[in-house]
Image: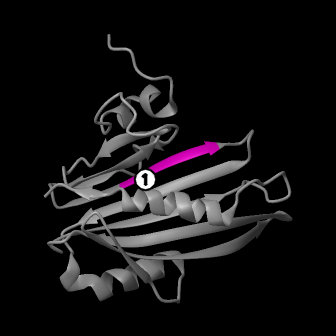
Amino acid sequence: MEEYPDTKAFQDEFTREFLVSTEEEEEGYYLFESGTGGYQVLYPENAVVSEVSYHKDGDGYESITFEDYSLENNFYFKHDLTFSLFGERWLEENLGSLSTKVGYEGDYKEIKKNGNKIYYAQDEEVFESDGKKSTVYWTFSYILPASGDFGLEYIFSASCYEDSKDCTIDPNEQTVNALKLMESVQFLK
C-alpha cells in the first residue's frame, strides 16, 4: 500500500481521490483536480472534502465543499466551489446569484491572473446564539477562464467557533489566503 502524507487531506479516502499527487505543490498545499476535469487549484493539507455535499452532473457541473476545522484551536475554514457551464455570457446573473448566497450588496473588484478574470469581494457577518458571538469573514469570487465558456464560483469563509475564546483569525490574512487559492485556479478545458 502506498504511503500517504500524514495530513487530514490524505488520511481521508474520499478527499484523496481529488488530489493529483502526494508531492506538495508548495508548503502546506497539494494540487486538487475537479471531478469534472475542468480545473485544478491549490488545496490546503488539512482540508477534507465533504462527501455529503458533493454533487456532480457529467462534466458540466460540480459542487464541492471542503473544510478545515479544530474545536480545540477554535477555527473553522470552509471552501465552497461550484463549476458550471455558465460562463461570461451569464456573468451578471452569476454575480447576482453569488451576492444572494452570501448576502452581499456591494460591488466586485476584478483582477487578472494566469489568464483568468477573477471578480471578487469580501464581507463579514456577526452571528449570535446562546449569548455567544461569532464573526464570519467571507471572501468570494466568480472566476472565468480566457475562453469564458464556463466559470467557477468560489466562496471562502473563516470563523472562530466563539469570538471570546482566543480567536486568532486575522481578516486581512484570510483574504490574502483566499485570494491565493482563487488565483491558483487553472482551467483545463
Q: Nearer the viewer, residue 146 or 88?
A: 146
Of residues 54 and 76, which is closer to you in this image?
A: 76
Q: Is residue 94 above or below residue 164?
A: below
Residue 61 position, x and y percent, is: 22, 61
Q: Is residue 23 left or right of residue 115?
A: right
Q: Quadrant of residue 14?
A: top left
Q: Is residue 64 above or below residue 157?
A: above
Q: Indicate the amino acid at tag 1.
A: Thr
Q: The C terminus appears in which quarter of the rendering?
A: bottom left
Q: Is residue 147 left or right of residue 14?
A: left
- The image position of residue 96, as x and y in percent, is 39, 86
From the viewer's perspective, tell me whether residue 165 is left or right of residue 99: right
Badge 1 marks a residue whose secondary structure is strand
In the depicted structure, whether residue 38 falls above or below residue 43 = below
- Quadrant in the picture for residue 125: bottom right
**Which residue is found at the position 47% from the left and 76% from the top?**
101
Q: Quadrant of residue 31?
A: top left
Query: Is residue 45 covered in magenta?
Result: no
Q: Is residue 67 magenta?
A: yes
Residue in front for this viewpoint, 97 or 2: 2
Q: Which residues are magenta?
A: 64-69
| Magenta stretch, main secondary structure class | strand
Instruction: Residue 15: give x, y in percent of width and height.
Output: 38, 37
Q: Is residue 187 left or right of residue 141?
A: left
The residue that appears at 64% across and 74% down in the rendered structure is 124
Quadrant of image for the N terminus? top left
Farthest residue in the top direction? 1
Q: Which residue is mark 1?
A: 65
Quick one: 171 or 150, which is closer to the camera?
A: 171
